[in-house]
Image: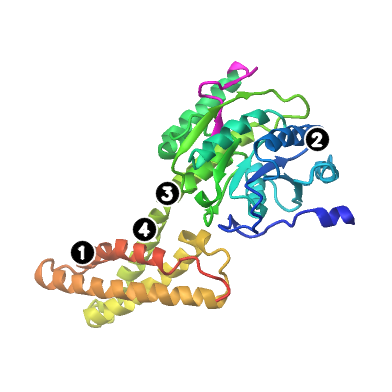
Amino acid sequence: MLRHNLLLPVSTGDLLIPLSPITDRDIQLSLIIPTYQERNNITEIVQQLTIELDRLIPNGYELIVVDDNSPDRTWELAQDLTEQYPHLRVLRRTKERGLATAVVRGWQTARGQILGVIDADLQHPPEVLGQLWQAIGSGADLAIASRNVEGGGVSEWSLLRRCLSRGAQLLGLIILPETIGRVTDPMSGYFLLRRETIAGKVLSPVGYKISIEVIGRGDIGKIVEVGYEFQERQTGNSKVTGRQYLEYIQHLFRLRLARSGRFLQFIAVGLSGVVVDMSLLYLFSDASTLGLPLILSKILAGESAIINNFLWNDRWTFADLIRTQTSRRQKFRRFLKFNLICLVGLLLSLTILHLLYNFAIHDRYIANFIAIASVTLFNYWLNLKLSWRVTDDSK
């Protein structure tokens, strides 16, 4: 029972790092050690890290083991070690899996203003922490250990593994050059960063590669790379499989879409609204159907398109921004904001339609399409800032 009480609580919900942790001014660095089936390595890595960090920042750090409910009960052995190493804390996850999300869950409970991660398998040499810590102290937002700069390398990798690694990096440069191109080793899982660079960002990592998520979504300014020699695993089995490479590619595309995809999604939804708008405009205004006045027909068709667009945007385009705001009242508030903004856009669209139809283009459908296109960017920007802005859920 006592052991169970010593476990850290597991955060749920969005993978979002708080700007202000539960403060402990003595804790400067929180270093996460994600584990799965690492019982044979956990004692050694904790011992080596303790020696190194006691030298660098005595009493100013914490080690957080985040274990994914390992069948070999790594988490249990880590708990036993807390008696000898009081700076060690343990978190056991039973409902989530994956190295990258384990790191973020660890950061969510961390108390330091500098956050970090290191593998538990002894392939990341703890002695490099000194150089990473010095880089942070010199003003770096991110200090990352790299196998591809001076002083770095891989010990006994096969030619195939080297080609796969370089190929993955090249693919990353093609898909996401502005992120992958900032570092020489984008798949590194050994780094330190300032909490404020990722605080408040909803993270969505895939698989094992947390560094590209941090660089891609964080406010990372200065980056310093420190060379290290990647060591071969002495005990246990490697977690690197073909699946990890597929997850890496999936992650690249998700980050690519995160940068440019939301507006494209908004456009796609807008096009569905155009279909609704055009169809109803014909139904309401054409002489062969209802024959209502053009302006009245546009108002009815426009409001119908607004409802269509809200439902699709809420469930798809901006769904990641409001995952914790799912109550009916919150949804209704978003709809009112969206409707108000789009009604302003509708007034602009009506004005443009009136001017075009009466003074330039005497085709109601072409004039209407131009009017809709003209206010799309206005609607997207304002809705992003207001309708789907993340707010306090308690209000």
Q: Nearer the viewer, residue 327 or 200?
A: 200
Q: Which quadrant: the N terminus? A: bottom right
Point out residue 45 in the picture as x, y percentages from the top left corner: 75, 33
- Span colored in magenta: 144-159
Image: 107 above or below 34: below
Q: Residue 43 carries which label?
A: 2
Tag 3: residue type? Arg
Q: Residue 259 carries which label?
A: 3
Q: Give the CA distance from mark 4 to mark 1.
A: 18 Å
Does label 2 or label 3 sit earlier along the sequence? 2
According to the image, label 4 marks what residue? 267
From the viewer's perspective, is the residue at label 4 or at label 1 nearer? 4
Does label 1 or label 2 sit earlier along the sequence? 2
Where disc 4 sits, the SS reads: helix
Image: 268 above or below 383: above
Where disc 2 sits, the SS reads: helix
Tag 1: residue type? Ile
- Residues at badges 1 and 2 in contact (C-beta under 8 Å)? no
Where disc 3 sits, the SS reads: helix
From the viewer's perspective, is the residue at label 2 or at label 3 nearer? 2
Q: Residue at x 75, y 48 (%)?
A: 89
Asked whether the viewer can see residue 47, the reply is: yes
Asked whether the viewer can see residue 246, the reply is: no
- Residues at badges 4 and 3 in contact (C-beta under 8 Å)? no
